[in-house]
Amino acid sequence: MTSAQQSDSWTGIGLTDLGRVRKLNQDAFSLNNTLQLWVLADGMGGHAGGEVASQIAVQTIPDVIRTQLSTETSPYLQPDELESLLGQALEAANQRIRKAAAEDERLEGMGTTIVAVAIIHSPIGHQASVAHAGDSRAYLFRQGTLSLWTKDHTLMEERLALNLITVEEVRTHPLRHVLTKALGIEPQAHPTIQTFALNPSDLILLCSDGLTKMLTDQEIQTIVGEEAPHAEAICRTLVATANRLGGEDNTTVLVIGLR
């Protein structure tokens, strides 16, 4: 993501699926390869609320960043500038979701998880800034190993951090999907934002919890390893596997790699 012409760029491919149980797909994503920005949202709320919230999020975040970049004069954004820009964009989406909910009682209480990745090509190489709120995740696949970049904003994660519960207990806990952060719920979203160095052979995986409810990280790693570097095949196989194992939720997967 620069305001100058890039010598090489990363490309994202995405796939979303209703699953086997839900009647409405409240997931949404946007691919902005030109901007080097990819966004995934998993909406929540009665009626069509979750669907509306996730769509607002994936439209607002690129709009805000595109507008801000049009005023950028430097050929390179610094990582801290990109992190700030991502934070502004997520907060803008938070406000738009809350405004829409306030104007239509049918949408009251709607919200959405969010995970967004923006990549810059700096003099020291490619770097990815990741912003998230909720339990949609970003993973890095490097040299056969999958590692988690994000930490879920959930009640169970907080209890794990305090050693009040074990990982095994989390899997079946009735409150395992209770979020502590999301867009649209509080006046400010306060997303977590981090920046990571990238290698040219890396793959980035974004997903909604429809995938991670059905597959363990080890199972995801195996599938990505078998299908890499073919992003479209990775998406198809992950979604198909989640559905084969029950498809209890909407499943959305984005895979980003260097073109």
Image: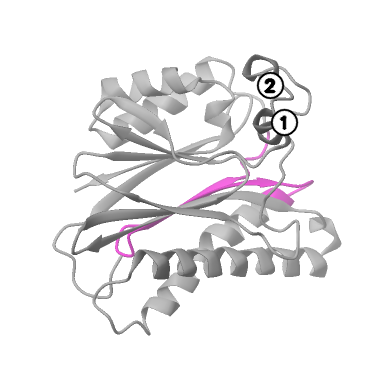
Q: Which residue is mark 2?
A: 170
Magenta includes 173? Answer: no
User: Which is nearer the N-term, disc 2 or disc 1?
Assistant: 1
Asked whether residue 56 appears in the rendered view, the answer is yes
Residue 50, label in figure: none
Magenta residues (range): 23-50
Relative image position of residue 205 (x, y in whole percent): 39, 38
Q: Tell me the quarter of the picture where residue 123 sits.
A: bottom left
Whether residue 239 is situated above or below residue 135 in the rendered picture: above
Distance between mark 2 and mark 1 Cα atoms: 9 Å
Looking at the picture, tell me which residue is in the foreground, 168 or 226. Answer: 168
Residue 18 in sight in this render: no
Residue name at image x 41 percent, y 66 percent:
80
Mark 1 crowdedness (10 Å alpha carbons): few <14, some 14-19, many ≥20: few
The answer to the question of whether label 2 and label 1 lie on touching residues, with beta carbons closer than 8 A, is yes
Q: Quadrant of residue 149?
A: top left
Q: Residue furthest left?
A: 7
Position of residue 197 in the picture relative to residue 159 (left or right) = left
Is 73 in front, or is 8? 73
